[in-house]
């Protein structure tokens, strides 16, 4: 593999493009928004600057990495000659199916099509293409340049050859690939999202406050950050979408999204991306400040 396309220039997409480019691959970064592409390149440059400060790479390494990334605003023009296309669009099933239908028509027949979906069925995605044997899941973790895990999800018709190719490719990126079967939420989110959802239920029922819940999980179970802070980083809309996939796919009451989670998404309080979730992210300080609506009445 020499040429890679990444569809979607958001948090996950720019991280995936960064990792491939830094590993020596030519990358087409595709998004319908020019401003999103500009922000993505800015983010990649900032992340590379941090590595320079830590003396992990040189200025020449940074320039070489950025030079390997070419931006496009259409799938057709960006994926013509790629060996692998990695879709990293928002966690919306209808959108992903549309993208894969386009990728199937625009890429060469032997190209592998991968999705960074965190919960949607790879088998269902593959079914809209003429090459289900060449469709696979590559679920990177956020932040992509730092986190080592890649969940490699095998669809019902994914071939052994494609699975082995993606497992080997993930290792070449410096990642640790783990093969996972195609079930709702796979492994990471099938375990993580119900925990986050339960933390939201715990908050909503008044068992404890935002700070208290997160502190218990950080100090009591050695989590690097509490579940409510993590939900803000992931995006509450993404958390809700994944819980809905779990609930619909597995049909068990324990996967039902918290009403508070749904209300916050409806209100537009999505976490870091909107400036407020369980915490306020517009205060310009590293201190975690609980959002006003969740502060005790006497504070």
Image (tube, rainbow, N blue to C red):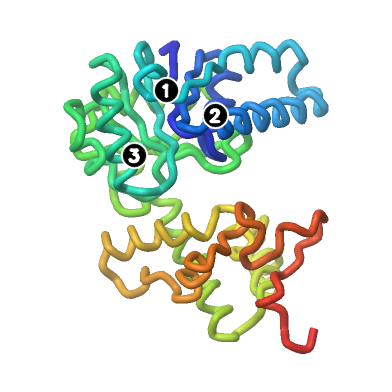
What is the x, y in percent for residue 183?
A: 29, 51
Between marks 2 and 3 in the image, the one whose residue lies nearer the viewer:
2
Which mark is in front, 2 or 1?
Answer: 2
> The C terminus is located in which quarter?
bottom right
Q: Give the alpha-carbon distance from disc 2 to disc 3, as whole Å.
A: 31 Å
Disc 2 target residue: 34
The residue tagged with tag 2: helix, strand or loop?
helix
Residue 274 x %, y %: 61, 56
Percent across and percent down for residue 238 are 47, 55
Identify the residue shown where x is 32% and y is 48%: 93
The residue indicated by pointer 1 is 168
Q: Are marks 2 and 1 in contact (CB under 8 Å)?
A: no
Left or right of residue 215, residue 266 in this image: left
Q: Picture quarter containing residue 3?
A: top left
Quarter of the figure with the N terminus: top left
Q: Is residue 146 left or right of residue 186?
A: right
Q: Which residue is mark 3?
A: 153
Image height check: is 195 above or below 108?
below
In three-dimensional space, the C-alpha distance between marks 3 and 1, rounded to whole angstroms, equals: 14 Å
Q: Badge 2 local density, few (<14 within 10 Å), some, or many (20+)?
A: some
Secondary structure of the residue carrying tag 1 is helix
The residue located at (61%, 52%) in the rendering is 273
Q: Residue furthest bottom?
A: 298
Binning the other alpha carbons within 10 Å of mark 3 as few (below 14), some (14 to 19) or many (20 upward) gives many
Residue at (26% x, 68% y) in the render: 251
Of the residues under marks 2 and 3, which one precedes in the sequence?
A: 2
């Amino acid at each position: 593999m020499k040429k890679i396309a990444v569809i979607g220039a958001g948090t996950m997409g720019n991280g995936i493009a960064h990792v491939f480019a830094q590993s020596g691959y030519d990358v087409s970064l595709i998004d319908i928004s020019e401003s999103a592409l500009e922000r993505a390149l800015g983010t990649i440059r900032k992340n590379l600057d941090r590595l320079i400060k830590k003396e992990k790479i040189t200025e020449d390494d940074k320039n070489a990495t950025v030079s390997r990334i070419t931006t496009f605003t259409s799938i057709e023009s960006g994926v013509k000659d790629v060996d692998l296309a990695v879709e990293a669009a928002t966690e919306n099933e209808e959108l992903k199916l549309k993208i894969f239908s386009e990728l199937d028509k625009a890429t060469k027949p032997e190209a592998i099509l991968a999705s960074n979906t965190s919960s949607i069925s790879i088998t269902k995605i593959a079914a809209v293409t003429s090459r289900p044997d060449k469709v696979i899941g590559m679920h990177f973790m956020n932040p992509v340049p730092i986190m080592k895990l890649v969940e490699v999800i095998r669809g019902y018709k994914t071939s052994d050859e494609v699975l082995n190719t993606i497992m080997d490719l993930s290792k070449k990126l410096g990642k640790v690939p783990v093969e996972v079967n195609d079930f709702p939420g796979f492994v990471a989110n099938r375990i993580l999202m119900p925990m986050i959802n339960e933390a939201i239920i715990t908050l909503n029922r008044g068992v404890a406050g935002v700070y208290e819940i997160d502190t218990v999980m950080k100090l009591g179970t050695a989590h690097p950050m509490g579940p409510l802070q993590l939900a803000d980083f992931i995006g509450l809309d993404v958390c809700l979408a994944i819980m809905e996939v779990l609930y619909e796919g597995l049909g068990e009451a324990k996967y039902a999204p918290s009403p508070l989670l749904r209300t916050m998404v409806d209100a537009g309080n999505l976490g870091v991306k909107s400036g407020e979730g369980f915490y306020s992210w517009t205060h310009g300080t590293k201190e975690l400040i609980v959002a006003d609506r969740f502060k005790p009445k006497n504070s």
